[in-house]
Image: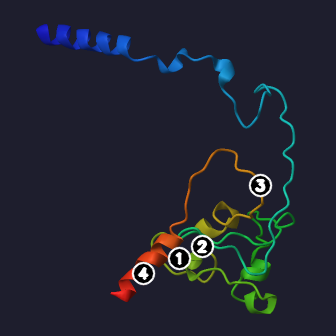
């Protein structure tokens, strides 16, 4: 009984000491929808010009999937077809002067090697994304580890 009384007293004390997280005004909350009500139709998203470069886009970490350096607005990925494969398949990539998809895309989660693209790697834009030169939606202090890794490797090589 004493234990229950002690825990209850401590819990009440803690509640009185900390401001409640839900005590703020809901009107202060903003979202990507802006001031649109949830049941109102949202404004169409303004299309941004995609970055196009023949040199590719640098990766920010070692195993980052490559970003798409070209327009993909006319590309279609459905259950019946994947237009990315016109250029990036093993059969076409040399002729199209495009990078071939990685060998890892032909392996199942059970490590079985397939003759065709694995179904879990079929929807390219789940991982590979086009880029646009836009202002970030939120503040971001991300720094690529590439420079730090390069410096570390250079120091190790100098030793």
5 or 140: which is nearer to us?
140
CA gap, disc 3 and disc 2: 33 Å
Q: Is residue 149 visible?
A: yes
Foreground: disc 4 or disc 1? 4
Return the x and y of residue 94 as percentages of the image width and height: 75, 92
- Looking at the image, residue 145 lies above or below residue 42: below
Q: Residue at x 19, y 7 (%)?
A: 5
Disc 4 to disc 1, C-alpha distance: 31 Å
Residue at image coords 52%, 72%: 147
User: How packed is label 2: few (under 14 Cα within 10 Å), some, or many (20 or more)?
Assistant: some
Look at mark 4 in the image and give the residue it sits on: 153
Name the residue carrying label 2.
118
Query: Residue at 53% of width from left, 69% of height from top?
Result: 61
- Label 3 – label 1 distance at C-alpha: 35 Å
Q: Is 137 situated above or below 43?
A: below
Name the spot of residue 12 as percent of width and height, x first: 31, 10
Q: Nearer the viewer, mark 3 or mark 2?
A: 3
CA distance for labels 4 and 3: 33 Å
Q: How far apart are the two marked residues, 1 and 2, measured between alpha carbons?
A: 6 Å
The residue labelled by disc 3 is 134
Considering only order in the chain, which callout, 2 or 3, is on the residue closer to the N terminus? 2
Q: Mark 1 points at which residue?
A: 107
In the rendered image, residue 148, in percent from the top left (x then y), is placed at 47, 70
For marks 4 and 1, the one nearer the N-term is: 1
Whether tag 4 and tag 2 are in contact, CB under 8 A, the answer is: no
């Amino acid at each position: 009984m004493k234990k229950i009384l002690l825990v209850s007293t401590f819990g009440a004390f803690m509640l009185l000491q900390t401001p409640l997280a839900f005590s703020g005004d809901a009107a202060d909350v903003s979202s990507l929808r802006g001031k649109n009500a949830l049941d109102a139709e949202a404004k169409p998203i303004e299309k941004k010009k995609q970055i196009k470069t023949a040199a590719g886009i640098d990766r920010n970490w070692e195993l980052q999937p490559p970003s798409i350096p070209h327009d993909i607005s006319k590309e279609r990925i459905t259950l019946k077809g994947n237009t990315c494969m016109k250029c990036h398949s093993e059969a076409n990539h040399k002729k199209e002067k495009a990078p071939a998809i990685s060998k890892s895309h032909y392996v199942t989660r059970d490590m079985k090697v397939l003759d065709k693209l694995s179904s879990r790697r079929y929807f390219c834009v789940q991982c590979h994304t086009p880029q646009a030169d836009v202002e970030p939606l939120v503040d971001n202090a991300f720094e690529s580890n590439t420079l730090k890794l390069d410096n570390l490797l250079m120091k190790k090589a100098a030793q």
